[in-house]
Image (tube, rainbow, N blue to C red):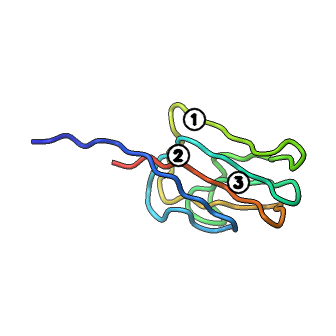
Amino acid sequence: MGTLMDYSRAIRVTASGVALNRPTRVSNVTVRPGGGDTVVFLRDGGAAGPILWDVEADNASGSHGETFNPPIKFDRNVYVDFTEQGANSSCCISVIEA
């Protein structure tokens, strides 16, 4: 019998909402401000869910990236919440799935 292998894939979002609607682990986040500073919260379970990670990406400094080892575990789903956002901002998460 074979074993399950983990694989990673990227999901890019440009507005607040559910990035992946199932339990998962996030191994990397990159926030790219565009046209203004950008503040992003990663929540577990929707817009009112607990904040598991947050960052402010300064437009003058460019993109902010972070790798998590071990990955952040989301028990319900991954909700990306842009609380401040430049006109062309985006958030890319790398999720690890079996």
Q: Are marks 2 and 3 in contact (CB under 8 Å)?
A: no
Q: Secondary structure at mark 2?
A: strand
Between the C-alphas of marks 2 and 3, the distance is 13 Å
Q: Are marks 1 and 2 in contact (CB under 8 Å)?
A: yes
Amino acid type at mark 2: Val
Between the C-alphas of marks 1 and 2, the distance is 7 Å
Residue occupying image coordinates x 86% and y 41%: 61
Q: Are marks 3 and 1 in contact (CB under 8 Å)?
A: no
- Badge 3 is on which residue? 41
Between the C-alphas of marks 3 and 1, the distance is 15 Å
Nearest to the observer: residue 79 or residue 87: 87
- Locate residue 60, reporting x and y percent: 90, 46
Amino acid type at mark 3: Phe
Residue occupying image coordinates x 44% and y 61%: 22
- Badge 2 is on which residue? 26
Nearest to the observer: residue 49 or residue 29: 29
Q: Quadrant of residue 43?
A: bottom right
Q: Residues within 10 Å of mark 2 (few under 14, many from 20)?
A: many
Chain-order first, disc 1 or disc 2: 2
Q: Quadrant of residue 29?
A: top right
Amino acid type at mark 1: Phe
For residue 51, the mark is: none
Q: Secondary structure at mark 3?
A: strand
- Locate residue 45, reporting x and y percent: 55, 61
- Badge 1 is on which residue? 68
Note whether 27 is above or below 23 in the view shown.
above
In front: label 3 or label 1: 1
| Left or right, 35 with reference to 67 | right
Residue occupying image coordinates x 25% and y 43%: 4
Chain-order first, disc 3 or disc 1: 3
| Left or right, 27 with reference to 35 | left
Q: Secondary structure at mark 1?
A: strand
